[in-house]
Amino acid sequence: MMRKLIFLTMTLGVFSQFSAAEDMQATLEEYRCGYCHKVDSYYHAPSFKDIAMRYAADKQRMLKVLPSKIIHGGAGNWGVVPMVTNHMVSPAAAHELAEWILDLK
């Protein structure tokens, strides 16, 4: 019985991770983040993993700063190409995106 419970718990955990990844992929597509960013590699902008690595030591402050950058854009932090505004993203969605980005390893 205990083995079945452990197996079920682990299986549900894996499915919830896949579900969360699918949900985030849908969010990235909805807000067109992939037009410039990729998870693992530089495209027109830094990868999400590069962003997470750069701000790993300052995560708490960046959880306050990054949502605003996602919505309002910015320039000068990653070179000469500015990040365009994206007013389709709500403050709550921007915070969720920022958390997801900063949690990447």
Image (tube, rainbow, N blue to C red):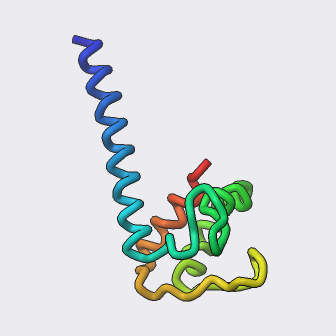
In screen coordinates, is 86 left or right of 2? right
Q: Which percent across, then down, holds residue 67?
A: 54, 75
Using the image, determine if residue 74 lies above or below residue 30: below
Q: Which residue occupies 37% across, 52% down?
A: 20
Residue at (35% x, 55% y) in the render: 22
Q: Residue 36: x percent and y percent?
A: 57, 74
Question: Residue sitting at 52 percent across and 61 percent down?
Answer: 99
Q: Quadrant of residue 85?
A: bottom right
Viewer-proximal residue among 74 and 32: 32
Q: Is residue 86 above or below residue 94?
A: below
The count of marks equals 0
* Image quadrant in which you'd find residue 43: bottom right
Q: Is residue 40 left or right of residue 88?
A: right
Instruction: Give the residue at the far left of this rendering.
Output: 1
* Residue 84, x across and y down, in percent: 58, 87
| Placement of the N terminus among the 4 image quadrants | top left
Left or right of 55: which side holds 72? left
> Which residue is at a point 41% across and 80% down the rendered structure image?
90
